[in-house]
Image (tube, coloured by chain):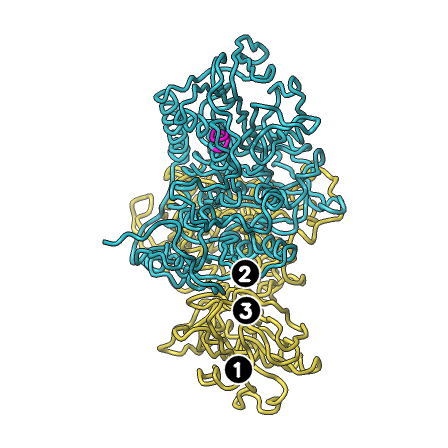
Chain colours: A cyan, B yellow
Amino acid sequence: MQASLSLPPAAPRSDPGPAVFRRSAFRFCGLRREALGLRSLRPAGSTRIFRSPARTPSRKTVTAVSGNGIGSLSKGFDYDLVIIGAGVGGHGAALHAVEKGLKTAIIEGDIVGGTCVNRGCVPSKALLAVSGRMRELQNEHHLNALGLQVSSPGYDRQGVADHANNLASKIRNNLTNSLKALGVDILTGVGTIADTQKVTYGKVGFPDTEITARDIIIATGSVPFVPTGIEVDGKTVFTSDHALKLEWVPEWIAIVGSGYIGLEFSDVYTALGSEVTFVEALDQLMPGFDPEIGKLAQRVLINPRKIDYHTGVFAKKITPAKDGKPVLIELIDAKTKEPKYTLEVDAALIATGRAPFTKGLGLENINVVTQRGFVPVNERMQVIDASGNLIPHLYCIGDANGKMMLAHAASAQGISVVEQIGGTDNVLNHLSIPAACFTHPEISMVGMTEPQAREKAQQEGFEVSVAKTSFKANTKALAENEGEGLAKLIYRPDTGEILGVHILGMHAADLIHEASNAIALGTRVQDIKFAVHAHPTLSEVLDELFKSAEVNTGVSPPSVNEPVTV
Amino acid sequence: MASLANVHLGTPFLPSPASLRGRSAACGVGGVAPRRAPRIQAKIREIFMPALSSTMTEGKIVSWAKAEGDKLAKGESVVVVESDKADMDVETFYDGYLAAIMVEEGAVAAVGSAIALLAETEDEIPLAKSQAASSSATMASDGPAASRPVADTAAPPSPLETAPEALSSSPPSSNFSPVAASSAHPASEGGQRTIATPYAKKLAKDLKVELGSVAGSGPMGRIVAKDVEVAAAATAAAPVSTAPPKSVSNSSAVKAPASPAIQLGTVVPFTTMQGAVSKNMVESLSVPTFRVGYTITTNALDDLYKKIKSKGVTMTALLAKATAMALMKHPIVNSSCRDGKSFTYNSSINIAVAVAIDGGLITPVLQDADKVDIYSLSRKWKELVDKARAKQLQSHEYNTGTFTLSNLGMFGVDRFDAILPPGTGAIMAVGASQSTVVATKDGRIGVKSQMQVNVTADHRVIYGADLAAFLQTLAKIIEDPKELTL
C-alpha cells in the first residue's frame, strides 16, 4: 500500500487559501516542516545517531525522549481508543492498539480503506501495472533488443478498469477482515467530536449514538483539492477519484498539476494511447523532486512521450465539454495574472493536490480552529486548540493534519500515537519516511533534497557531499535492458550521516527502503557500506552508492548488533 | 570524421566537478582537419565527442548547455553527454564562441567525431557555420553523427519560418470563446491560433513542418499527428522532386537519394519525405482494405477527349470529373473512417491525383471536382502541376483529398492496385485503355477500347456492394460521357 496518491497539493495554485498552496515548500511540506520541527527538538543532529552502549537491539527506531507514561488504563469509558476514519492511518493505529491490548473502535462513514485503498494508491497501482506492461510491449526497439517479437499489443479498457476495481475491493475486504478478526468494532456513520473524550456518530446530521473513549484519534484523511474556477463534471473534467475508474481514455487530456498524482496519471494515459498536456503553476515540472532527479525525470518520463506542458501558469477557468465544444482551459500567467492561452482538449484531470477532510468533525466543540482545513497538531500528533493549548486525549494523524500526506506516514503516525497512549513517549522521524512515484521507471526518495540539505548545512555549518551511481552500471538493470536511472546520496562527510537518498530507475520504490531504514536506525554510510548485497541485483545500485561515498571518519564501534560467530 | 587519436591530443574539455565521482573524461578539441579547410585552421576548433569511459564507443548528446553564438569562458559547462555508463557535463578549456552545433540534442555521435565548432572570435562564427554545414554533409554519408543533418532541406513550401510553438504564437488576450466562431476550423480562429496535440507539435518540430499550414482533421479542426505526417510527406515531395541538381552539392546529404546516380552497394537512409511515406505506408496496414475491379469501355471517352483536347482539357481532368460525378451519387465511397467507430462523410468531393516526379510522390487535389466544370478543372490541374514543380503548393492543395486517383495507364500498365492513403476511404488505380476483342450486345465479335480500374477501399466504411454500385455508375458515365462537359 504505497501512497503516491495522497501526497500534498501537487501543483500549488488556486486563489482562495493561497497562503500555503502556492508555496513550493509545501510540496514536500511534511519533510520540510518536520525538518524545522526536528531542528528545534534536537541540537544539531547530534541525537539522531545513537551510539550509546546502553542501546538495546529492541529499542524503537524513533527518538525516545523521557517517558511520561500514563500508566494503567482508565476505567469508565466505552472504549480505550476510538479512531474516526478507517483509512490506512486509522487501520494502522487500530492494529497497533489491539496489539497493545486497548479496546478499540473505528468509525467510518464511507467505506473501509479510505482514499488510499479505494480512490488512491491501490487502484492507481493496478492501472500503473497495466501501463507498465503496455509500455514494454509497445517498445518494439526494446523488445527486439531482448530478442522478443510481439505483434500489435492492445488493451480492453473495461478489463483494465475492472482490474483496478477488483484490486480495491480485495484490499478493502482484507482490511475489513483484519479489523474484525482482531476484535476492533467497526461503527458505521459519520463521527463527530462532542466533547473531550466523547464522540457521537450516525448518519449525516443525525449523530444519535454517543460513545466515550479515553483517547480519540482523528484520521479522516483528505479529498481531491479543486481550485475555484474549475468546474468538475466527473466526465470530461475530473479528479483522480473519477480517473481511477477509467471510464474512458481521452485522446488528449490536460493534467493540471505535475506532482506525483499528475505524473503517475500521465504514465497511465500515455501508455494507453492518450496525448497529455501538463499545466503547472510553478516554473518547472515536478517541483517537489530533487532538481537533478527532476531533470532526469523530465528527460525519461516527459520528453520522449507524447506530452507537452505549460509551466508558470494557473488554470483560471476550466469548462467541461458540452454541446460539441471541447474542454476549455483558460491559462493565466502565474505571476502577472495576464491571460496567456486557452487550451482545447478532450478531458482535464485536476491533480492539484489534496485538501483535508475535516468538516463536520465538531472541532468547534473543543475550540479547535483548522488551518486551511488541517487540524493543528504538535510533533506528537496531539491536537492544539485555538489558544495554543494541547487538548488532552485527542490526536490527529494522516492527511487531516497535513504533516506528510502519505498513507504509510499516516499509519506510522497512528502507531506513534498508540505508543504514547500506552505510556511510551514517541516522536516520529518524518525524515525517515520514504515516498515513491510509480511511473515507469519509478522515482523514490527519503530525507532531504540536495537544496534542502545544503540550506540546512549552511545554517548549521556543516559540509554536505553528494554521491551518485547510475543504473547503467548495474548488471541486473542491464539484463533487463533498463539502464536508465540514477541513485543519489546526500550525506555528511564528517559524520557519515545520511541526509537524503533519491532514486530514479527500475523498481526505485522498492529500493529506497535500505536507505530509509538506515536513516530511521541512524546507520551511517561508513557502516552500511560493509553490508553485503546479493549479486546480481538492483540493490547493488545502492551498494555502489554507499561505497562511492567518501566519509572522513572511521567505522563506528559495533553497537547495533553483537557479531555472531558461526 | 576525426579519428579516435584526436581524443587524446590535448584535452581541453574535462568533466565539470559536478560530474560523477571517479570518472574522467577526455574530450578532444583540435584544429580543423587540414583536408577540409586548411585556410581556417588556427581559429576554429572542433569539439569532439569525448570518451567518457574505456568502453564508450559513441555518446548521446543529452543537452547543449549553450546555444550557437554563446560566448564560452574557460571551464564553463557546454554540453551534457550520455555514455554507456553515465551522464557527464563537459566543459571547455578555451575561451571563444560556440559557433555551430553539429550534433543536435538527442542525437548520437561516435567518440572522436566533431559535435560542434568553437570560434575564437565572433567574426569567425559565420565561417564556422558554413564549415559546419559542409562537414555535416560529408559526415552524413559515412557516419551516425549526422543522423539529424543541420541543413534543412525539407523546408515547407510556405514562406513562413520554422514552426513556432503554438504557445508562443498565442494572442495576448484569451478572453474570447474560441468555439463561438463556427468556421470550418474553429480551433484555428482564422489562422491566428493553432490547436495541435502534443505529439503533433513534436512531430512538426522533428519533421520541420509549419503547423500553421497544416489542415487539422481532429475534433474542431485540431491538428493531430497524422495531419503532420501527411503534410510532411507532401511538402517533402515537392522540394525533393523538383530540386535542381546543382543545389545538391552545397546542401546536406538529404538530397543525395534524389539524384539519379545511385551508388550500388550502399545503404542510403530515407529522406524526411521518404520516411514519412514509409510511415504512412506502414500505417495503412492497420486499415482493412479490399479491392474491386471493373472493366470500362472508353471509346466514347476517347472520342470526347479528342474533341475537347484543343480547349485544354486533359485526360486526368476528365477522369477526375467522371469519378467526382460518380461519387456524388455514392457519398459512402467518398467517406472515411477516422477513429474506427464512425463514418466521416466528407462535405466536398476533392479528388487527389497521385503524381510521380523523379522518385518523389505528391497528390495535388482537385477540390470540389463535382462542381467545377471540366474546362476550369483542366486549368486548375495545370496550375497545380506547375505549382508542384515550383514548390509552391499550399497545404490545402495536397492534403485535402477525399478520394485518390492513381493512373499508370500512360506507361502501358494495364492493371495494378494501389495502397489506400491513411485518412481516406478509397483510391482508384486506373490502367491503360487498350483495344480489346469483345463480344458485342448483338452477339458479334467487335473491337473496343477498354481500361481496367481497381478500387482499394477501407472495408470498415465501404462495403463490396457500395464499390460495385459506384463502379457501375462510373462505367455508365465514362461510357456515355456527355454529362462530363455540362
The stretch of residues the image draws in magenta is: A416-420
Label 1 SS:
loop
In percent of the image, x 74 and y 47: which residue is there? A335
C-alpha distance separating marks 2 and 1: 34 Å
Of A441 and A551, nearer the camera is A551
Instruction: Work out whether A357 lies above or below B332.
Output: above
Instruction: Work out whether B382 lies above or below B97.
Output: above
Location of mark 1 (residue): B11
- In which quadrant is the N terminus of chain A drawn? top left
Q: Residue A178 has which mark?
A: none
In percent of the image, x 68 and y 74: which residue is there? B71
Going from N to C along the chain, the mark reached first, 3 or 1, is: 1
Going from N to C along the chain, the mark reached first, 2 or 1, is: 1
Q: Main secondary structure of the magenta part?
A: helix
Residue B97, located in which quarter of the rendered image? bottom right
Label 2 SS:
helix
C-alpha distance separating marks 3 and 1: 15 Å
> Disc 3, disc 1: CB below 8 Å?
no
In percent of the image, x 49 and y 62: which residue is there? A467
Residue type pointed to by label 2: Asp
Q: Are marks 3 and 2 on the same chain?
A: yes
Residue placed furthest toward the left? A566
> Disc 3, disc 2: CB below 8 Å?
no
Location of mark 2 (residue): B206
Of A11 and B414, nearer the camera is A11
Asked whether A174 falls inside the magenta stretch, the response is no
Location of mark 3 (residue): B89
> Disc 2, disc 1: CB below 8 Å?
no
